[in-house]
Structure formats: structure tokens, C-alpha cells
Amino acid sequence: MHEGQSHYLLSFYKNPPLYAWLRKFQYIRTRPSNGQLIMLADDGYVEMLEMAAKGRILFNRHQLQKESIQKGVATPSAQLDRLVIPKLNAPLRLQLKLAEIDGLPKFLLSTDAIIETKKHLLPLPFITYDKRLGAFYFDRSELLLNDLMRAVKGKIFIAMHQHVLLKSLLLETVFWTQNYASDIRVPDAYLKLLKANNCSKQTIQHYHSAFILYLYVLQVKGKDLDLIPPTEVNDLVLQIATANGFSTSSIHVFINAVLYYYRSVKQLPAYKSEIKRPKKGLVLPSVMAKEDIQAIIKQCDNLKHRAILMFMYGTGSRAGEVIDLELKDIDSKRKIITFRNAKNFKDRTVMLSEKLLELLRTYFAEYKPKKYLFEGQYGDKYSQSSMRQILKKASIKAGMRNLPHLHQFRHSFATHLLEAGTDMRIIQQLLGHSSSTTTEIYAYVSTKHIGQVRSPLDDLCI
């Protein structure tokens, strides 16, 4: 900057003839302080100099835009605006729990911001505040719960405790969308068919989240859900996926959610053939070394915490399967464990390791669980969030640079069995995979044979 305007600085090694020649041009000025040559930051002047020099001077343009390039790298901007539903930012947060008060079933609402919450809840005729409990409650009615959710939207975010199981799927969607500024709703027929097809709650939630975004974008663009042709649906789906940076897997879920409406709800087969899908890449599962798993487990001083991590690695189970497991599903005589109604509503059995059985007996004698193998402090199911915290703390204490996630125990279980020579079909059965193709992915991450291959680098005399 010079005198409030942007200038180019002409910098070169000491060359008196060149310096004198450049000073002849009227648009080139000299700084009084140090004699440096400058000119207005106009690329037209640069071109004029190049023509006058007739190829005898080479201008390094890299420095001209260096500052703006660095600024752009520091604060990159997306080429496409993300297509997302506007969100509300509720200032208060409550948790919905189950309770029995005076022998009657109630919904309980707990919060740390009692005074602020009273302003919103007490005007509702069905809400009661209990000073002894330090919480709000009302009759355990899903109709009343729906009224509550409608009344406090945008003011209070209500998190649902894992033990609250709602009968109404429509009410579930109210919880999923309570932070949305838009009142767009997925058609009831869409949700009812998903439920009728016995889809898991996780699948329904993923489909709902994807399809409601599609509905929002249609509304913004002024498109009719039932009149948009298949080719335009394809373009719109890919536009949303590109703008939001979806992974290949997320794009497939998004396409499936959109197709489900046209193909299954509306029974229009043309949409199946028109929508194009991206090719899925080969994503290898992340596997831990046995030494790392051993180091993590050794850092668990708490008996229950150690038992949970050992159980996950020793059985190849999913986190949800661990917290759902009941005592009756463990057969210590036959040395097997039965996971009931697991993913895709399938039962399966796995082996019960002698080392794990010995630890579980010690754990059972100390904690005395009543129904579930791993119970919370109130005799309810243990939570996955608590399991994640166990793994995180143990991994940090073990000095792990990359903190693992719970599902890596399952990946490691399968890979280590394969490296030990276990038949792929047995591993498939232990994991509960419907297709052998799913299990075969572990052949790509097994290092038993790869690690024994001699690199050609070892043959060089260097």
C-alpha cells in the first residue's frame, strides 16, 4: 500500500541500467524513503512493460497474487452453498425420563435451569413442578408429550433418555426435527410403510433425515414432490449430495430414501431405473493390533469397565448388542452367548471364552446384575455413551495417538481370527453377516501374509 492505494513493487537484483530504463515510464514512481520502484497494481501496466522490454525482461507473476492466494487458502469458501434445513438454537435443554410418582407412571423433565424453565412450562395446565424432586412431571401420555413438544419448540430442546420408548413413530419424528426452523413433515404413508416393513429405528431415522432434506430443497426450488420427473430427481439428488459434501455411502442412503417414496410408497418403477448411483469405493475397516488392545484393557482398573471392553473384543459384538444382552443369554455350561434380535432382527450365537467367563464370574459376584449383563446405576441398561467414555479414558491412559472407537473391537476380532486361520464362513457366522462378501473385507486388512512378503527394496545394495 502506498498513499492509500495498492501498488506493485518492482524488485530485482542490483542493475543500474535497468533501474534507469524503468524510471523513464510515467506510471512508475520512486519511493522517496528508499528509492524502490513502484507502480499502481494494474495488470495493464505489467503488459505495457512486457511489450516495451521485447522479451528481454521476465516478470515473475507468482508474487503478484501471493497475498490474495494465501488469504484464500486461510479462509477457503465453498463453490456451492450447502443445502441444509435452517436450525433453531433453543436456549434451554431438558431431559425426558420415566418416573413413578405416588405410584402412578409419569414423564419427568429434569434441568439445571429451573427458574427459566418454569416460565415456559408452568403456563401449560398439565405440567407440575415438584420442589422435592427439583423437576417437572406430567401424566405419561404421548398426546400430552406431543402438546409439550409443540408448545416449547425453539425455546427448549428436550433430549429423550434411552429408556423412553415411544409407541408413536410420528411423535418420534417430532423429537428428531425439534431443532428445525421449518415445519416440513414427511408424509405419514412414508413412515407407516417403513414401520410395516419392519425397518429398524436407526434405518427409519436415517431415511427420515434424508427425505425431509429432499422435501425442503423441493420447497425452496418450488418443485412438486409428485410431479418432478425421474431425470430431474437424479439431478437434484446429486446437486444436494455435491453441495453438502456427502460421502459415497451417504449418497447411497440419500438415494435410497428418495427412491423409497417413489418406488415403494407411490409404486412408480421408472424412478428406479433413472436415478444414477456413484460407485462405492473399497473402504477398509480400521483394525487395532493385539498389543494395543491389551494395553487399553490393562488401563481399566474398574472391574465393570474391564469386563465391557474384554466382552466386546472377545465376542466381536456391536455396542448395542452388549447393552441389550440379558443374563439368560449367557450359557456358561455350553460356553456360548446368544445375541437375540440383533441387527436386521437376527439371532446368533458366539463362543464364550474361558478367560472372559472367569472375569464375568468375578464381575457378577461383585455387581450382582438383575436382568442385563451390564446395568446402569438404577438397574437399567448401560448406555453407549458411557461405553465410549470408558474406551476414550483407557486409550488416553494407554498413550494411544489415534483414539479408537468401539466398533474397532469388532473389526479387530474378525481380523485376528482370520489371521489365526479361522475359516471365513465361521467368522461370517460369528459376526452375523448375511453375505460372505461383507465378511471378505477383512481379507484386505489381514497382515499375516502381507507382512511376510519381501520388498524388492531389500534386494538393493544400498
Image: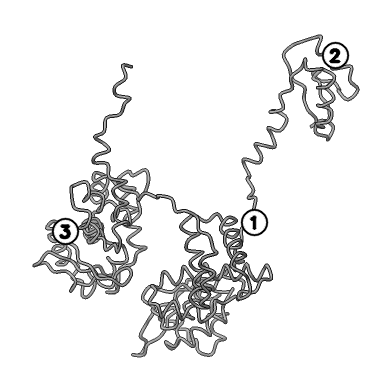
Of residues 276 and 382, the one drawn nearer to the viewer in this rendering: 276
Identity of the amino acid at label 2? Trp
* Residue shown at 83% from the left, 34% from the top: 5
Q: CA distance from mark 2 to mark 3?
A: 87 Å
Residue 438, quarter of the rendered image: bottom left
Of the residues under marks 3 and 1, which one precedes in the sequence?
Answer: 1
Of the residues under marks 2 and 3, which one precedes in the sequence?
Answer: 2
Residue extending farthest to the left is 333
Asked if 78 appears above or below 207 in the picture, the reply is: above
Q: Quadrant of the N terminus?
A: top right
User: How far across and how far down the image is residue 176, in percent?
Assistant: 50, 72
Number of other residues with Cα within 10 Å of mark 2, as a class: few under 14, some 14 to 19, many 20 or more: few
User: How far across and how far down the image is residue 196, in percent?
Assistant: 41, 80
Judging by the rendered image, the residue that carries numbered circle 1 is: 81
Judging by the rendered image, the residue that carries numbered circle 3 is: 356
Identity of the amino acid at label 3? Leu
User: How far across and how far down the image is residue 114, in percent?
Assistant: 50, 75
Of the residues under marks 2 and 1, which one precedes in the sequence?
Answer: 2
Number of other residues with Cα within 10 Å of mark 3, as a class: few under 14, some 14 to 19, many 20 or more: some
User: How far across and how far down the image is residue 126, in percent?
Assistant: 50, 89
* Residue shown at 52% from the left, 81% from the top: 188
- Depth-wise, is mark 2 or mark 3 nearer the camera? 2
Judging by the rendered image, the residue that carries numbered circle 2 is: 21
